Amino acid sequence: MSAIPNVPFPRLPMTSQALAEALLQRFGSRVADAVLAALDISDPVPLDIVEQAVAMALDAELVVAGSHFVMLMPISALTNSTQFQRAARQAGVPADRLDTAQRLRVDAAFVRRWRASEGARQPAHHLESAQATMASVLLDELS
């Protein structure tokens, strides 16, 4: 058996269509469209532009994730926030008995329901609505 020579792979450019499809698949249309609009892209796309596009998309993804985290902290089960405790009382769930895995599951379910509901179109700190949603999630997830 002969050894494979240690030759670096060539850094080949990709088509703008392939870049657009890759960004869309990994990051979704909002991020992909924003990145592609910000870059002056032609065919073939040089690798340094591909790398720049991916870096921009990753940065955008982190910003969005961070902003969602900050917006949802006031109702978080994991942080055992005051609003979460109120929602737990409203649902008749003893918050002090929830373990970390349950709290993570409840937070994830809350985020899914909040985004799918009218709550996603309200200010994130619309706490009365968020508290009612959390109480409903607690009943559904823990019963």
Image (cartoon, rainbow, N blue to C red):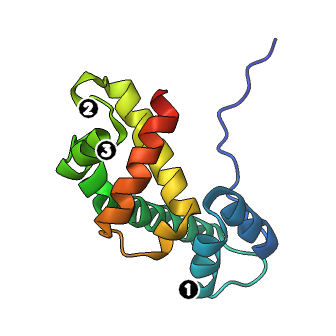
Crowd rating for badge 2 (residues with CA inside 10 Å; few <14, some 14–19, many 20+): some
Relative to 28, 143 lies left or right: left
Q: Are marks 1 and 2 in contact (CB under 8 Å)?
A: no
What residue does disc 1 label? Answer: 38
Q: Residue 77, how many percent across, how many down?
A: 30, 41
Label placed on residue 95: 2
Q: Residue 69, how many percent across, how many down?
A: 34, 56
Q: Quadrant of the N terminus?
A: top right
* Comes first in the chain, label 1 or label 2: 1
Q: CA distance from mark 1 to mark 2?
A: 46 Å
Quarter holding residue 46:
bottom right
- From the image, state whether disc 1 or disc 3 is nearer to you: 3
Q: Residue at x 26, y 40 (%)?
A: 89
Q: Residue furthest left?
A: 82
Q: Mark 2: which secondary structure?
A: helix
Q: CA distance from mark 3 to mark 2?
A: 11 Å
Quarter holding residue 48:
bottom right
Q: Mark 3: which secondary structure?
A: helix
Evaluate whether residue 56 shows in this view: no
Relative to 46, 123 lies left or right: left
Residue type of the residue flagged with mark 1 = Ala
